[in-house]
Image (cartoon, rainbow, N blue to C red):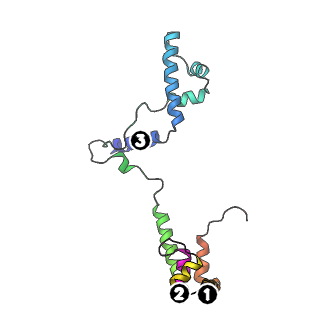
Amino acid sequence: MLVLLAAIFLTLVYSDYQAHMVEASYRVKECTKRLRRKLKRRPSNEEIAVDTGMPVKRVEAAVNLPKYSVSLDSKIGSTDMTYQEVTADPSAETAEEMLNRMSMKKDVHQALDTLSPRERQVVKLRFGIDDGRIRTLQEIGNIMGVSRERIRQIESGAFRKLRGKKKVKCLMDYLVPVGNW
């Protein structure tokens, strides 16, 4: 198990290096070969830095890069798992984010339940609450068979109703402050 974790760790660490470090590693390796032939000994990091024009810290980082790479499709040890299967997806939703989203969805629906069915439908269509598609007043008017002005009035009435509700005030907790307005 420890070997499995070490292999995963090495894969994750290696995958985080940027392309410029891989290129720096190649330059350092080539320079080391050339200087070794010329000096008849292993060159110091300072000598490599002078020859390549790179800072000593970057040379040291390039020298310490892992010397191998592992395909994400390759099997881990004797298991049937691949590195790709155990590597975390940084864009994946965390459990906390999922619970927060579900809680917010429940709170939004509770707030909308205080509206009349018609007002609820207008707000849901306007903000794409059910299907993710935001609609214009005109589109909603066409769907409901009334003018866009009537939809605006229904929407305004719904917002007036929602402003004073405790169930709506709890939605403020989900807002993330952005800068100084």
The quadrant of the image that shows the N terminus is top left
N-terminal label among 1 and 3 = 3
Name the spot of residue 37 as percent of width and height, x first: 49, 11
Which residue extends farthest bottom? 116
Q: Residue at x 51, y 69 (%)?
A: 100
Amino acid type, callout 3: Thr
| Dot 1 amino acid type | Arg
Disc number lying in front (3 or 2) = 2
Residue at the spot of label 2: 145
Which residue appears at 47% of the width and 73% of the height?
Answer: 131
Observer able to see residue 112: no
Image height check: is 93 above or below 130?
Answer: above
- Check disc 3 and report the residue beneath it: 11
Identify the residue position indicated by label 1 in the image.
150
Q: Position of residue 154 (x, y in %)?
A: 60, 87
Q: Is residue 80 magenta?
A: no
Of 7 and 133, nearer the camera is: 133
Residue 36 in the figure: left or right of residue 164? left
Q: In this picture, is 43 found above or below 26?
A: above
- Disc nearest the viewer among 1 and 3: 1
Q: Earlier in the sequence, mark 2 or mark 1?
A: 2
Q: CA distance from mark 2 to mark 1?
A: 10 Å
Where disc 1 sits, the SS reads helix
